[in-house]
Image: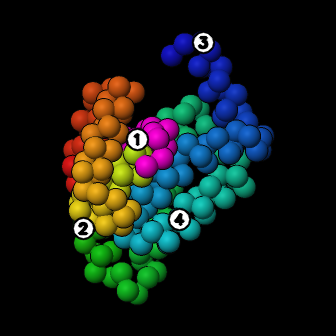
Amino acid sequence: MSRKSSNNEYELLQGLTTGDTLHYSYIFKEYYSALCHYAETIIGEPGHAEDIVQDVFERLWQKRYAFEDLRHLKDFLYKATRNAAINFLKGAQHSKERQAKFLHEQEDTATGEDLDIIRMEVFRVIYREISNLPEQCGKIVRMSYIEGLKNEQIAEVLSISLQTVKNQKTRGMKLLRMRLSPVVITLFLLFSPHS
């Protein structure tokens, strides 16, 4: 890591400890979407996932934890989100079957957690880059590769032609390939519900 990025990391982490709203806002913007997606994969409910992640960030703000480095901060955010989501499942009557299935699949496997963190980090980077795409292009890429909608469904929802959807998807992926490493693109396509 370069000295400059090391200094920036130190300032960011110090800002969190001292309650600096700019540093806190940066962390919130950087991780919120990916953490919501992560929580949703556990509980299957977007609205509750957002509530869970907001609670995690509220805890981060109130407790003023001291983190050694960004990796330590990321670990905290993902583990706190995972634990909060599991606690939500334990308390939700309508989710008993989902809870049992998830807890069985996730039984303290470090590799499972590591894979989840890698997956969410890939989605965090992708979310950021998709938001930088031209508006319609970004919307179509998000609907296809993140929400898992088929081309025909996207065309219907957006009231555009099927060919426009195909053209915008191709354009979006071309732009993402120019901006991101081949490894990130490959992992994104591997983790996507539809490609």
Q: Which residue is mark 2?
A: 104
Q: Which residue is mark 1?
A: 126
Q: Earlier in the sequence, mark 4 or mark 1?
A: 4
Question: In the figure, 36 relative to 10: above or below?
Answer: below
Q: Residues within 10 Å of mark 2 (few under 14, many from 20)?
A: few
| Disc nearest the viewer among 1 and 2 | 1
Which of disc 4 and disc 3 is earlier in sequence? 3
Label 3 or label 2, whichever lies nearer to me, is 3
What's the CA distance linking mark 2 and mark 4?
A: 24 Å
Secondary structure under badge 1?
helix
Q: Is residue 106 left or right of residue 76?
A: left
Marks 1 and 3, how far apart at CA: 26 Å
Specify which label sits upstream in the sequence, 1 or 2: 2
Q: Earlier in the sequence, mark 3 or mark 2?
A: 3
Q: Which residue is mark 3?
A: 3
Identify which residue, 187 or 165, lies in the foreground: 165
Examine the structure image and report whether residue 191 is included in the region drawn in magenta. no
**Residue drawn where x is 51% and y is 56% of the image:** 80
Callout 4: 10 Å neighbours few (<14), some, many (20+)? some
Left/right of residue 55 with respect to residue 18 in the rendered view: left
Q: Amino acid at mark 4?
A: Glu
Three-letter amino acid code of the residue under disc 1: Ile
Q: Which residues are magenta?
A: 118-136
Amino acid at pointer 3: Arg
Q: Amino acid at mark 2?
A: His
